[in-house]
Image (tube, helix red, strand yellow):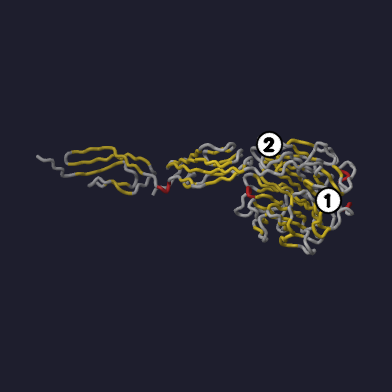
Amino acid sequence: MPKNITSVTWSATGLPSALTINSATGVISGTPNVQPGDYTASVTVTTNYGTDTKPVTVRVGIPAAWLPQIDPNQIVNTIAGDVMTPYTVTGQNVTLGG
Amino acid sequence: MPTKQITSVVWSCGALPAGVSFNTATGTFSGTPEVEGEYIVPVTVTTNYGTDMKNVTLSVAEPEVEEDGEYGPVYAIGTKAKTWSGNAEADADGFRKLNMPDACRLVKLCTGFAAKTDSLQWYVCGTTIHGSSSAHPKPYGVTGLSPSVPVQFPVEDVVDMSSGWYRVTSSVSGSYYFAYLTSDHVSHVVLLMTANSAITSVGNIKKLSSGYGAGVMTIDNTGATRYENATVRGQLAVGVSPSQVKKLLATGMYSKPRMPTYITTSGYLYKGAERVDFGGGKIRNIWGYPHGEKQHLFAVTEDNQLYAMGENTYHSLGLDGTETRTELELVGEWDVKTIAQGSTMDTFLLTNDGKLYHSGAAMSVYDISKIVSTHESFTHIYPDKRFIDIAMYSSTTLVAILKE
């Protein structure tokens, strides 16, 4: 007698906020509303023959606009023997809280 | 969308020039670089979102070496010369050698007023270099409160000096201020001296200046402008940092409101926040005599064009006519080393080849007016003498370092 899978239902717990799983296809989609990082969801599939649950890692990447970037071509002019005016290296996303 | 939350920032960098340090919390370079050169320093920043590395260039320029090897004894001519010299014999021109140790040979002079006692302040620095380093010898300072014996004390390199006095009440003048700016490996220090001879270190000063009735004005390393008993108030132009101020006059040549007058390292002249454009080239130095409404400003450009403004009733600007100039006007080509003004009645001009010129009504050193005559333009005086530095005490005594 051939195998005949007549029902498949997907579900998941622990998905990052605003991500959903399509119960029919198992496709996880959406716009994650969480800080970048690895999130472990527990995904369950149930067919007419049984059920299985495995951890699935959802890796939320870092937006390019959030990456630290030091401004290029910075030149600090000083004079030997003179106390220099303190110079702080500039860039994007390089200050706390910013 | 989640909000960006930068919760950690750590900086690091590669090899640094000697004397420079790097703050790994703030990404800030500071210190006193010791050796000139171009240093390419890889700088890395790491946040909770990632890391980046770029090269930052630290350009360490050679220090500006000042005139060296020119020093000599101090002489005075005028009303105070006799007192200060201990009644030393005058030479043929009327100059008297001041009462100070024979070993004292000065390279720089500064004088100032003292209301309660007749006093003269002068300073020496030996081998001088702008910005000291361990490779250069430490000079010493000398101050004199005439007629007492000059006091010697060790100082770091004297990079600038200035004097002024502050009117405590309308009738009696109070404190006299004398300040000198030195450099060391950590910070600049200014000392203030009052008529009571109290010397106070106020620390961390980068620029200083002073003026009649103005006390001493300073800019510290953080960029803050402050006034020690000064009556002037003002601000630097937007976009001009204190490190770009080359020379500062405590009271502006533009009397109301009083404001700092200064030139920047790029050669621009400012009164307060306003840049003065007068048609000349880049300015290398300025001198001012700010006394109430009677004011002088001299400015010399890098190509030795001398400009002047202010009162010219007695030809003290060296310009034709007697009308007051409200804008800078060309005096002529002069290789100016320094200018001394005792009042707005006459002006002494020292050239880099050591010659002294005079223009005005000869009210300075008035008791020897038979020697210094009235001149309607800058005229070579005391042609047998060569001068290293000059300064005026009040309006009646000229103090000079002479070449021996």
**Chain ID of residue with mark 1:** B
Front: mark 1 or 2? 1
Above or below — where is B161 with respect to B277?
above
* Quadrant where the C terminus of chain B is found in the figure: top right
Q: Which residue is mark 1?
A: B383
Q: Does residue B202 appear in this view?
A: no
Q: Could you tell me which residue is drawn at 86 percent across and 56 percent down? A: B373
Q: Position of residue B380 (x, y in %)?
A: 81, 54
Q: Does residue B402 appear in this view?
A: yes
Secondary element type, mark 1: loop
Quadrant of res B75: top right
Q: Position of residue B321 (x, y in %)?
A: 79, 64
Disc 1/disc 2 C-alpha distance (Å): 35 Å
Crowdedness of circle 1 by 10 Å Cα count: few (<14), some, many (20+)?
A: few
- The kind of residue on which mark 2 rests is His
Q: Position of residue A67 (x, y in %)?
A: 43, 45
- The kind of residue on which mark 1 rests is Pro
Observer-nearest of B94 and B326: B94
Q: Which residue is mark 2?
A: B136
**Chain ID of residue with mark 2:** B
Q: Report whether mark 1 lies on the same chain as mark 2.
A: yes
Whichever of labels 1 and 2 marks the residue nearer the N terminus, that label is: 2
Observer-nearest of B36 and B315: B36
